[in-house]
Image (cartoon, helix red, strand yellow):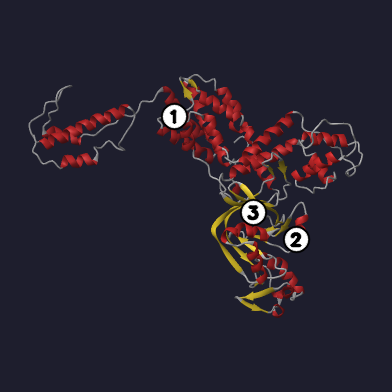
Amino acid sequence: MGAKKIETINKYFYLKVFVAVLALAGISIFHSSAVPIAFAQSEAASSEPAESSPVKPQEGEAVAVDGELAEQEAEAELIVPEPVLSPLQLAIKAELELRKDAAKSKALRARLGDIEAHYIASGYEPIWIEGGKPSKKAEDMVEMINLSYEDGLEPNDYDADELFQKLGASDESSLADLEIHLATTSVSYSQHMNAGRLNPSEVNREIVIYPSSLGADSILGNIRRTSSLKAYVRLLAPLTPRYERLRSALASYRRIEANGGWTTVPEGEVLKPGMTDERVPALRARMVQAGLLEGEVTDSQVYDDALVAAVTEFQDRVGIEMDGVVGPGTLEQLNIPVEDRIATMEVNMERNRWMQNDFGAHHIFANLADQVVKVVLNEKTVHAEIIQVGLPYHRTPVFTDELEYVEINPFWNVPYSIAVNEYLPKLRRNPGVLAAQNISLLSNGNAINARRVNWNAYGKGNFPFRLRQNPGQGNALGRIKFMFPNKFNVYMHDTPSKSKFDRAQRYFSHGCLRLRNPLKMAEVLLGEQGWDREKIDATVASGKRTVVKLDEKIPVHIVYLTSWVNKDGSVHFRKDVYGRDNIVADALAKVRGR
């Protein structure tokens, strides 16, 4: 026999030994039992003739094989035995099949399918069972589920009590039941912590963000490998100071609830600074409970300066006029039950879970409920100002985009809806309204005389014109606009309606964000590109339309948060003018227990 032939046969022998060892470890290297192609080709390449019948080597003897045996061995299949499942593994497999068959919803069947795939890949090895009993990891997960209310979730949605009872399981059947029940619940709980219970765009079409969570295999794989389950689950929640501050405040408000809530301030006449009123002690107690007034509650009925200052701060924290006067609006806010405040916090924790962790080192953050916009650079607010947002019937949507350019002395292309709903009725009465507002009437791109049009012949769905307001005094966009092109036609801009910024609530636009100090905003955003305030003012004064493209796009995040906690620890609430809190709360109520 040639040396090359013997070398090839020896390689094959050692390969069989290697595969057999892997099989004993439960590891398969081939998707089929066929001889590897590379080896088969190597065997076929040999052209030496067959020799006499071989003698099977005994243990410890040298290998001596003739050509005929080599060919038989080359054609033989490598059979990797199926792993033998223990009684517990068999019970886990059966429990998965049982739960899949019993699943009542498509979503649950899909989730169980993903979980089953993980267990198949892991040979049905348990995650939560160790030494024939529920492990410390199982106990930790059940504990965290019981404490899920700390994140504004409902423990009963994750079968907290039932799982706690199942920690006493001892036989294979009950252990397998616990294993799959806890695995299924852990996936749901982890995904909800990571990206929220709800799909926001399905709950409300005005919320155009698409959070995505980890898959079941990733979650269970991480849980299986981690030595610190509690730390891993905490990492699934939003890794933002905003979320953690609200979570901490929620715990404080739950303690207030457990102690019976806060003092009710009775109704009565408007209470002004310096007045004497029998309701003042209750008001003082309420401010002490809110952490806005130090010292003991006294029986004094004088509405003194210290109490006025506390009430003014309270008004700021709930977004109403800061005048220190306790009228119907302030009284209403004072007497909102702590349970309602907790419910608002829970809704906003859900909103925080929808948001991405990283808004970008340099970004713009606009909270519609607060009517405030901020420019943030490296986690520091470098500019903030109050804004006007969409009217309740022109609600500004929630979405994320990127600021691309700034336009000084802009044209205002009147949106079609405003043209037909607001300007068309005016044109029927007085065609001169456009000229009075410096608006051009365009047809096929050409300017035409509005007085030569029979406006009664046109209406909604039949309006082939475009209205464009020219730059200058009275332009609806003011002197400057900030563009982050999007399908909603929403952007930031100046406005001639400055007096409305003095209101505590500023829902006045058709959906865009109107800025109180737009030239300062331009200075902040364009300063690095050589646009100082002097250059900006000179360009505005020229009256010439000028577009400044940003060297780097800046993320713009438009959110709707009716509760948050500032860095100083102050807890804030805002009225749900758009009714979006109720929509989210109702949607959460519908999925309770699922």
Q: Is residue 281 left or right of residue 219?
A: right
Q: Quadrant of the C terminus?
A: top right
Specify whether residue 434 is in view: yes
Cα–Cα span, label 1 and label 2? 68 Å
Going by the numbered disc 1, the residue's amino acid type is Lys
Residue 156 or residue 226, whichever sits in front: 226
Q: Is residue 301 left or right of residue 459?
A: right
Q: Quadrant of the N terminus?
A: top left
Residue 33 or residue 383, whichever sits in front: 383
Q: Quadrant of residue 465?
A: bottom right
Residue 379 drawn at (x, y percent): 60, 46
Residue 310 drawn at (x, y percent): 80, 40
N-term-proximal mark, 1 vs 2? 1
Residue 368 or residue 103, whichever sits in front: 368
Residues at discs 3 and 2 in contact (Cβ within 8 Å):
no
Question: Tag 1, which secondary structure?
Answer: helix
N-term-proximal mark, 3 vs 2? 3
Q: Residue at x 19, y 36 (%)?
A: 75
Residue 283 or residue 69, whichever sits in front: 283
Residue 233 drawn at (x, y percent): 54, 33
Query: Which residue corresponds to mark 1?
Result: 93
Going by the numbered disc 3, the residue's amino acid type is Pro
Q: Residue at x 61, y 57 (%)?
A: 525
Query: Which residue corresponds to mark 3?
Result: 397
Mark 2, residues whose alpha carbon is within 10 Å: few (<14), some, or many (≥20)? Answer: few
Question: Tag 2, which secondary structure?
Answer: helix
Question: Please, is residue 336 above or below residue 370 in the view?
Answer: above
Going by the numbered disc 2, the residue's amino acid type is Lys
Query: Which residue corresponds to mark 2?
Result: 498
